[in-house]
Amino acid sequence: MWKYSTYKQFVSNASPIIALAQINKLDLLEKLFSWVLVPPAVVREISPTVVLPNWITERALMHPISSRILNTSLGPGESEAISLAFEIGSIVIIDERPARWLAESLGIDVIGTLGILFKCKQEGFISEIKSYIDELMNNYDFRVANDLYERILKETGELP
């Protein structure tokens, strides 16, 4: 498994930023990564609901989006986030399964909201993650497969 500490740049899609903001834990991204880049389409997606802190910076793509990415059913934010991560050689922070699969097929390391919570517990930034996952699932229509939910809670010692 990759180590996030070996990367210098991090690109996020809208959904992890929105999810973490919903549970008042957006600061966890800063604790893990110090600063995060987002492409313009992501800024447009989150601007109605989340005010971006100064450690989340908008960065435009330097090159057009690859046809391999454009020929998918991904939304503009996902497409631009994957393209930017590919362009600058960074991790992409993204939740949606098809987008994760595409990013991984392009050789991009991926982490999502649950991975952020998991790593923050490992690093000691939070003492538990179950209540945050439950809040996302119960109040914000965040979907987590039962087996993944149980596996994460077992690995963090929050489920016997």
Image (cartoon, rainbow, N blue to C red):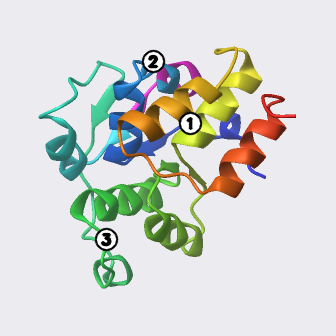
> Label 3 is placed on what type of residue?
Leu
- For this orientation, the residue located farthest to the right is 160
> What residue is disc 3 on?
74
Q: CA distance from mark 2 to mark 1?
A: 18 Å
How busy is the neighbourhood of tag 1: few (under 14 within 10 Å), some, or many (20 plus)? few
In this rendering, the answer to whether 9 lies above or below 95 is: above
In this orientation, which residue lies closer to the viewer: 134 or 79?
A: 134
Residue in the image at 82% along x and 39% along y: 154
Foreground mark, 2 or 1, reads: 2
Mark 2 — residue?
27
Residue 56 lies in quadrant: top left
Image coords of residue 16 (percent x, y): 41, 41
Relative horizontal placement of residue 159, taking residue 125 as reference (left or right) = right
Q: Could you tell me if the residues under marks 3 and 2 are in contact, i.e. CB atoms within 8 Å? A: no
Element under label 2?
A: helix
The residue positioned 35% from the left and 55% from the top of the image is 81
Q: Nearer the viewer, mark 3 or mark 1?
A: 3
Q: Quadrant of residue 126?
A: top right
Please give the label number shown on residue 8.
Answer: 1
Are circles 3 and 1 on residues that touch, CB within 8 Å?
no
Mark 2 or mark 1, earlier in chain: 1
140 up-or-down from 61: above or below: above
Question: The magenta stretch spans which residues?
Answer: 30-36
* Element under disc 3: loop
Q: Are marks 2 and 1 in contact (CB under 8 Å)?
A: no
Please tell me how crowded label 3 is: few (under 14), some (14-19), or many (20+) other residues with Cα within 10 Å. some
Nearer-N-terminus badge (3/1): 1
Q: Residue at x 50, y 39 (%)?
A: 9
Is 157 situated left or right of 91 in this image?
right
Disc 3 to disc 2, C-alpha distance:
27 Å
Kind of residue at disc 1 = Lys
Query: First in sequence: mark 3 or mark 2?
Result: 2
